[in-house]
Image (cartoon, grey):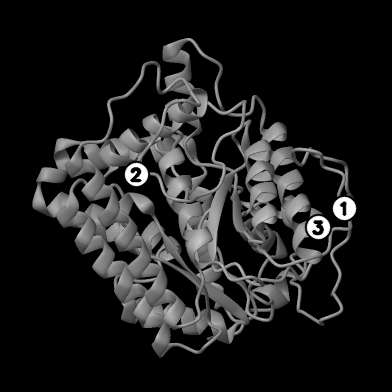
């Protein structure tokens, strides 16, 4: 890769670092151990139930293991392996993506009948390929993605492989998605042993969404009605707190049919096959989160897999906590407490969340309180508090944490 031009504006580089503040697939320093935090935020263990945000001005320093920690202010060193042209292209793409009218226009164009005209369609898709796609997508297949991973590895970074398919509709589409996810996991065998930090899995790709919604309804009803039993339920961990949203399920749902129970068992087997293939390459799995209508079923399957696969001193299945939800801290703490009693290490990926508009719109239509924090500062405080809590936990025992954020302030605080 070409070196960065010494005359390139530091303002552009810092804009590139700071522009986005939403969570997405991340890269991590390859010099950090996967399941041991290299940062100790020196926080208190005095959380009785959940990690409440506290003020903290902790500076990030190199720990005793001499792990490398990136200085995000040193943009010259940070982008030394990236060409000037690539940086300018990325800066332009990110800045354009932050212009709301442009985003609205792009969505309108993609959904318009103009896309039915072949020439117009080809021009639009070509534009997308060389802008947003080129910036955000590692590759169209495992070969292209592998090349991107190697470039990151040469720069001191590790890649998280995320096959971009979700919301499968039936067993056939779930089987196809599972095969692709297995191929993704298998591809790590042909890459340097420490170049891939995680294989990311979306449960909506291995279990039909309608079934996730059915299971979520039943889990919510079981939580609110202790006499209500679910014969198909396997060992898992707590997935609700008292302040979790339950308005999705206003009346007792019908039991799963025999066919639905069979489909749920198939979903478990698909997740098992992906996990086991990934573990063959010594790569952990992280399971992504979705909207609150189906998240209970996703957490149920995530924690089932955690109970099944996590080792006494190592978490190899990670769940995802969405810090823009008001119940995020309480749920995480309850899950962690239950796991501690079992002697089970847990791994969490922390994100802010991606369904703010739809979640608020649904809550408003039902006349109930939104599950989303009222202000962005509340979401930031929840994220930082949850991260600080888990960093403290894993600094004193087994477990793992992924800080999935583009928010520079959160990274510096932790």
Q: Estimate how packed mark 1 is, as few (under 14), some (14 to 19) or many (20 or more) residues with alpha carbons within 10 Å.
A: some
Q: Which mark is residue 354?
A: none
Q: Residue at x 89, y 58 (%)?
A: 42
Q: Estimate how packed mark 2 is, as few (under 14), some (14 to 19) or many (20 or more) residues with alpha carbons within 10 Å.
A: few
Q: Are marks 1 and 3 in contact (CB under 8 Å)?
A: yes
Q: Residue 216 appears in which quarter of the rendering?
A: top left
At which x and y percent is residue 93?
A: 47, 56
At which x and y percent is residue 21?
A: 61, 48
Q: Are marks 2 and 3 in contact (CB under 8 Å)?
A: no
Q: Estimate how packed mark 3 is, as few (under 14), some (14 to 19) or many (20 or more) residues with alpha carbons within 10 Å.
A: some
Q: Residue at x 40, y 44 (%)?
A: 233
Q: Which mark is residue 392?
A: 3
Please, is residue 44 above or below residue 224 in the view? below
Q: Residue 58 appears in which quarter of the rendering?
A: bottom right
Q: CA distance from mark 2 to mark 1?
A: 40 Å
Q: Secondary structure at mark 1?
A: loop
Circle nearer the N terminus (1, 3): 1
Nearest the eye: 68 or 127: 68
Would residue 30 be found to the left or right of residue 54 on screen? Answer: left
Q: CA distance from mark 1 to mark 3?
A: 6 Å
Q: Which residue is mark 1?
A: 43
Q: Residue 126 appears in which quarter of the rendering?
A: bottom left
Q: Which mark is residue 232?
A: 2
Nearest the eye: 31 or 271: 271
**Residue most extreme to the left:** 117
Q: CA distance from mark 2 to mark 3?
A: 36 Å
Can residue 168 be seen?
no
Please, is residue 263 above or below residue 142 in the view? above
């Amino acid at each position: 890769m070409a070196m960065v031009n010494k005359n390139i504006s530091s303002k552009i580089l810092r804009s590139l670092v700071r522009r986005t503040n939403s969570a997405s697939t991340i890269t991590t320093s390859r010099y950090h151990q996967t399941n041991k935090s290299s940062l100790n935020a020196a926080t208190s263990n005095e959380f009785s139930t959940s990690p409440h945000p506290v003020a903290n001005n902790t500076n990030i320093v190199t720990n005793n293991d001499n792990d490398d920690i990136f200085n995000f202010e040193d943009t010259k060193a940070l982008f030394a392996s990236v060409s000037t042209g690539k940086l300018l292209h990325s800066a332009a793409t990110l800045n354009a993506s932050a212009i709301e009218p442009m985003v609205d226009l792009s969505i309108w164009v993609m959904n318009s009948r103009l896309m039915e005209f072949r020439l117009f369609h080809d021009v639009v898709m070509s534009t997308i390929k060389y802008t947003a796609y080129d910036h955000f997508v590692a590759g169209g297949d495992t070969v292209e993605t592998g090349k991107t991973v190697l470039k990151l590895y040469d720069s001191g970074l590790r890649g998280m492989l995320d096959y971009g398919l979700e919301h499968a509709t039936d067993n056939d589409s779930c089987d196809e998605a599972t095969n692709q996810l297995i191929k993704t996991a298998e591809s790590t065998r042909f890459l340097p042993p420490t170049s891939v930090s995680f294989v990311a899995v979306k449960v909506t790709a291995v279990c039909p969404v309608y079934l996730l919604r059915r299971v979520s309804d039943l889990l919510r009803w079981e939580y609110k009605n202790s006499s209500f039993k679910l014969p198909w339920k396997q060992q898992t961990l707590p997935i609700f707190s008292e302040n979790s949203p339950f308005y999705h399920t206003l009346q007792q749902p019908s039991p799963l049919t025999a066919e639905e129970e069979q489909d749920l068992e198939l979903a478990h087997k698909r997740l098992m096959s992906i996990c086991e293939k990934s573990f063959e390459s010594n790569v952990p799995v992280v399971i992504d989160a979705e909207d609150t209508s189906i998240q209970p079923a996703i957490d149920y399957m995530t924690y089932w897999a955690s109970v099944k696969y996590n080792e006494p001193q190592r978490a190899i299945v990670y769940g995802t906590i969405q810090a823009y939800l008001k119940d995020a801290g309480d749920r995480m703490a309850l899950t962690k407490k239950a796991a501690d009693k079992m002697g089970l290490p847990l791994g969490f990926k922390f994100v802010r969340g991606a369904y703010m508009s739809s979640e608020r719109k649904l809550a408003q239509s039902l006349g109930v309180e939104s599950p989303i924090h009222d202000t962005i500062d509340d979401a930031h405080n929840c994220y930082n508090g949850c991260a600080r809590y888990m960093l403290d936990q894993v600094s004193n025992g087994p477990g793992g944490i992924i800080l999935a954020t583009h928010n520079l302030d959160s990274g510096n605080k932790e």
